[in-house]
Amino acid sequence: METEHAPTASPAGEATETGTASTEASGTIFESARGTAVKLLSRYESSDSYIDKLLEAELRRTELSPADRALVTELVNGCVRWQTRLDWVLTGFYHGEFTKCLPFVKNSMRIALYQMLFLSKIPPPAAINESVEIVKRLKGDKHAGIVNGVLRNILRNIQNIRYPVREENPVLYHSVVYSHPQWMVRRYHERFGEHDAELLLNANNQRPMLTLRVNTLKTTVEEVVRQLEEAGITHQVGRMHSSSILINSLRDVKHLPLFEEGLIAIQDASASLAVHLAAPKPGMVVFDLCAAPGGKAVYAAELMKNQGTVIALEKYESKLRLISDNAQRAGVTIITPQQGDARDFTSDVLADLVLVDAPCSGLGTLAKKPDIKWRRDLDDIRQMSTMQRRILDHAATLVKPGGVLVYSTCTIEPEENEDVIHSFLETHPDFTLDPAERTLQPEVCKNGMLQTFPHIHKMDGAFGARLIKKQ
């Protein structure tokens, strides 16, 4: 199940800090950039919705200027990304129980503190005044006075903020300073050691760059680079995947001719590598069992030179349109979107290649989706693993002798990755692992499988295994 999309965090960082510094005199408080951010954060806190969906829906209907829209995105994602660190500081300065604050009050303080700690182009007094005004208009002078006092006290002592002592409790220290749940930090320490765990935590907190994949059916990397240069968009060609180009521009690429004409797609390099691992060839019959929004199916069809058959299966009918739209824009005609469940899909024809881009915890994509770390726990990982094994077991019945089965995820958790493959191979002796090094660069391979990490490969954390069905 794909998560390839434009990052919701503003990639250019401080270039987004130019939103208006005062609340507009007309309209409601929620028509300002910071008021909108407070509203979205409060809505996120009281619902099960993911922050990127809330942001997308709000910005679609807003009349904010491009600069203020970028500021909303920066504030919302920044506060979610750094929530533990922000709350640690606010708890230390707030007289009473900060966690029991009214949501609008709590989030008004969070956005002010986020600006004070992380956005150097916005004067702290302006950030404080805006949050105080929001609280004043929503809850009155009493609450506004408390917020003003807390934030100005933090500003006076900002160089002396104390965090947990690393030597006394390294897990708590990393949890607060890098704003990750303690269970996740503890796992990272155990798996990677404290030093590498810290690098990974830091990488998860970076504002994500946007990765474009060049559609070689229609153009070349060189032509796309030329057009990006003409548009003044800073970019770099991917080191691990030569058809991927990273940009760090605030521009909405979906309105660029490059995107509208299907010359590029938005797809992380780790997802592209999973398709390369599958190595689809012209004329093949391919089943993509968890296809929406269709990025991997489209890329497979491009590598097949638009020759053969790709069945793009999706459980939810409402998402089939996404697959069709992406295929049409790319100029691909061999994809057939089809509604169905990957756990019981049947076909009269066996496939040369079956792709299982499995539903997963998404814990390799925390830079793009910071709220995932607050929405997941160990039970989620275990439950995902059970479902993934069931999907993979069924997918094996759809592969013809000599055919290929590729399993991929966008997580770095072993229970969802190599453990699933090892279990599968133990119960399916008619399949063998085809070493990933035969298809991919050794730098992205581990134990014969695709494995990327944000702090090592500068892309999403992802996994892939290529399995061959014996003749």
Image (tube, helix red, strand yellow):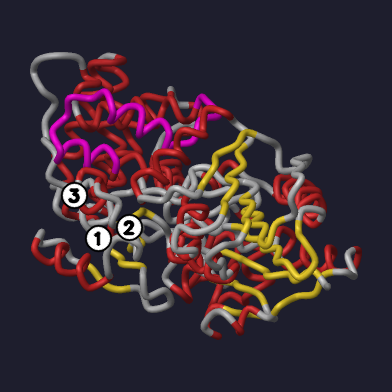
> As displayed, is residue 386 above or below residue 444?
above
Q: Nearer the viewer, residue 425 or 90?
A: 425
Q: Are circles 2 and 1 on residues that touch, CB within 8 Å?
A: yes
**CA gap, disc 3 and disc 1:** 18 Å
Observer-side mark, 3 or 1, equals: 3
Where residue 367 sits: x, y (%)? 43, 56
Secondary structure of the residue carrying tag 1 is loop
Q: Residues within 10 Å of mark 2 (few under 14, many from 20)?
A: many
Three-letter code, disc 3: Pro
Near mark 1 (Cα within 10 A), the count class, few <14, some 14-19 or many ≥20, is: some
Q: For the C terminus, give its image quadrant.
A: bottom right
- Which residue is at a point 40% across and 30% down the rendered structure image? 54
Nearer the N terminus, badge 2 or badge 3? 2
Magenta region: which residues? Answer: 46-73
Q: Where residue 164 sits in the image (x, y, percent)? A: 51, 60
Question: Looking at the image, which is closer to me, 100 or 107?
Answer: 107
- How crowded pointer 3 is (Cα within 10 Å; few <14, some 14-19, many 20+) is rated as few
Judge whether residue 427 is colored magenta: no
Mark 2 lies on residue: 210
Count of numbered circles on the image: 3
Identity, as a three-letter code, of the amino acid under mark 1: Asn
Q: What's the CA distance linking mark 2 and mark 3? A: 17 Å
The amino acid type of the residue labelled 2 equals Leu
Residue marked by disc 1: 248
> On screen, 261 above or below 164?
above
Where on the picture, by quarter, is residue 425? Answer: bottom right
Residue 255 percent location from the top left of the image: 21, 43
